[in-house]
Image (spheres, rainbow, N blue to C red):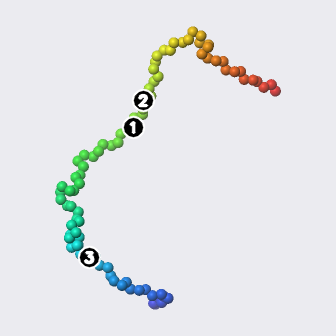
């Protein structure tokens, strides 16, 4: 039950092997494991975020304005609209 393929598979030329860890120690680059170099655990959890309060709407000042003697001069009459006749 062998299947013959029209191509051939080549064997790998060399097998890669990992080098021993001795060289890593010679380089001097290792992770410090002393107690002073380790991160300390948080003693107390931070508080939960607070909801934002809506901004207070300031009311206008409650002062009185001096009314002019001729109040009709302050307001102008709106122009009359022309009515269409059918």
Tell me the residue that label 2 is attached to: 56
Q: Is residue 26 left or right of residue 54?
A: left
The quadrant holding residue 77 is: top right
What whole-number distance in Å separates the C-alpha atoms at marks 2 and 1? 12 Å
* Count of residue discs: 3
Up/down of 77 relative to 44, above or below:
above
Q: Is residue 12 left or right of residue 21?
A: right
Q: In terms of sequence position, does the residue under pointer 2 or pointer 3 come before the other?
A: 3
Question: Which disc number belongs to residue 85?
Answer: none
Tell me the residue that label 3 is attached to: 19
Disc 1 element: loop
What whole-number distance in Å separates the C-alpha atoms at marks 3 and 1? 59 Å
Q: Is residue 39 left or right of residue 15?
A: left
- Give the foreground label among 2 and 3: 3
Question: Which disc number belongs to residue 52?
Answer: 1
Up/down of 19 relative to 33, above or below:
below
């Amino acid at each position: 039950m062998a299947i013959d393929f029209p191509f051939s598979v080549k064997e790998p030329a060399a097998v890669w092997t990992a080098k021993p860890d001795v060289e890593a120690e010679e380089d001097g680059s290792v992770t410090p494991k002393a107690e002073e170099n380790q991160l300390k655990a948080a003693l107390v959890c931070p508080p939960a975020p607070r909801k934002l309060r809506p901004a207070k709407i300031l009311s206008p000042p409650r002062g009185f304005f001096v009314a002019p003697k001729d109040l009709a001069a302050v307001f102008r009459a709106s122009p009359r609209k022309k009515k269409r006749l059918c």
